[in-house]
Amino acid sequence: MLLTFVRTGPDAAKYKGLSALLIPTAADGVVRRPFGSIASEDDHDFNEVFLTDVRVPRENLVGPLGEGWRVANGSLGHERTLLWLSYAERLQDLVRDAVDASSGQEWYATLLMDLTALRLLGYRRLGPDRNPAEISVLKLLGSEAVQNASLHALEAHGADALPHPARTGPYHHMDNEAFVSSWFERYACSFAGTIAGGSSEIQRNIIAERILGLPR
């Protein structure tokens, strides 16, 4: 099922003409083409989706007609709230798995501080009357901390980090295997985190305007 935002009010101003629709992937005219990632041609986490003359029933509308922008903001808020928890777990995994290459390394100390900061800010965000834009701080900090720590771990392990596929952490049936695979794959897969749920550039704009009060 695809959560799709479509323009239903062509004459409405900007965000006012958007509506949210659920489109079944099996609907006529929907073509999905999975493609491999930089880590593996078998890693099909991303897909191209093409819609040609697709028709869906009115009951597939999510929320009121023309209120798709509100639905989008709500769904992104929930997604980013869950993402920071995922980033905290990945940072904890990096603390565990990179300890053998951490001796005297400043980046490892930064990793520990980023993990602590992310958890404390996240727990603070769960309190009442918080600014919704604070979720962007968590998303930005978490995704970029994972990417930076993954790069440093890759470099610290030197030539031992290059064999791929490989396993660098303990297997758990509930975990995404990419997060305990080779150091190369762990770093390569970290880039998706700075894009999914709103890119880092978007998060910085939100923080600048809605928290720091800077002009557009």
Image (spheres, rainbow, N blue to C red):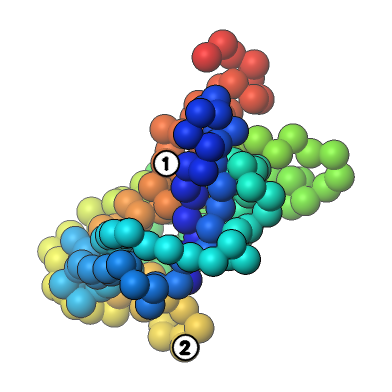
Count residues near mark 2 (Cα–Cα under 10 Å), then give few for <14, some for 14-19, many for 20+.
few
Query: Where, by quadrant of the figure, is residue 13 drawn?
Result: top right
Residue topped by disc 2: 173
* Foreground of the two, 10 or 111: 10
Residue 210, image x, y percentages? 64, 25
Horizontal side of 99 relative to 112 (left or right) equals: left
Query: Taking 31 as reference, is 65 above or below it?
Result: above
Q: Is residue 207 left or right of residue 43?
A: right
Residue 186 as seen in the image, left or right of residue 36 = right
Rendering coords of residue 78 (x, y %):
64, 55
Which residue shows up at 65% across the image and 35% down it?
A: 133
In the picture of the structure, the residue carrying the numbered disc 1 is 199
Q: For the residues carrying marks 2 and 1, which lies nearer the camera in this image? A: 1
The residue shown at (35%, 54%) is: 192
Residue 179 visible in the picture: yes
Sequence-first disc among 2 and 1: 2
Question: In the image, what residue occupies the spot 47% across and 47% down?
Answer: 6
